[in-house]
Image (cartoon, grey):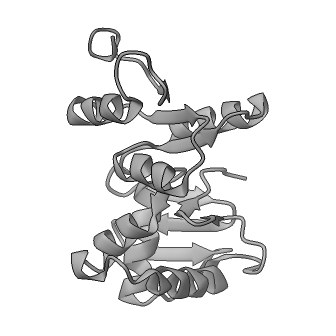
Amino acid sequence: MAGTERPDLIILDLGLPDMDGQQVLRNIRDQFRTPVIILSVRTAESEIISCLDAGADDYLVKPFRTGELLARIRTALRRETGLPPGEMFTCGNVSIDLTARVVKKKDEIVHLTSTEYSLLSLFVRNSGRVLTHAYILESVWGPTFAGETQYTRVYVGQLRKKIEDDPSTPRLILTESGIGYRLSGEEE
């Protein structure tokens, strides 16, 4: 159905009668970039991480609040797969120009190390999407750093100190406990 109807977003339950939901997710990802939100009663961290690593944009455990689902749908639909050259990404009082490699907070230039910038640009390109520790590590540091989750914690902490108004209660780079991080897609 996704191939013929071309939906804007897919909400996928893992407990399907004729095929495992993760296999459906893999089939979708082989052909389409359509945002996919998983809804499931499965709460195992390994299951959630597996789905996010396989390409799900989000994972929501049943039972869930309708308002939260609607907010996650809005975020997934708002998220772009990449910014056109020269376009600014703005979230709150932080703006990022990926072409010029310039980050500003309240119109003041924020100086980032190259690793901090690589991490922030990864978040920007995946705004609103949950990124697992493994995905972040492989994307920024390479496959040999797969188990080094302390790298993400340290660098996310450094980024928060530079771009968040209050790093102890972040509003831009959000923690997904035990899974990874998400850059808030909410603009103020």
Q: Report whether 131 appears left or right of 145.
A: right
Count of residue discs: 0
Image vertical order of residue 8 relative to residue 44, above or below: above
Q: Report whether 133 appears left or right of 140.
A: right
- Name the residue located 51 percent from the left edge and 35 percent from the top edge: 37
- Name the residue located 69 percent from the left edge and 76 percent from the top edge: 164
Foreground pick, 169 / 61:
61
Can you tell which quarter of the image residue 36 is in? top left
- Name the residue located 40 percent from the left edge and 51 percent from the top edge: 50
Q: Report whether 32 appears left or right of 41.
A: left
Can you tell which quarter of the image residue 35 is in? top left
Foreground pick, 157 / 153:
153
Image vertical order of residue 121 relative to residue 109, above or below: above
Image vertical order of residue 51 relative to residue 162, above or below: above
- Name the residue located 73 percent from the left edge and 37 percent from the top edge: 68
**Residue 105 place in picture, x, y as percent:** 63, 75
**Residue 55 place in picture, x, y as percent:** 36, 45
Foreground pick, 31 / 145:
145
**Residue 156 place in picture, x, y as percent:** 55, 79
Q: Is residue 20 visible?
A: yes
Q: Can residue 77 be seen in this view?
A: no
Image vertical order of residue 44 relative to residue 12, above or below: below
**Residue 1 place in picture, x, y as percent:** 33, 10
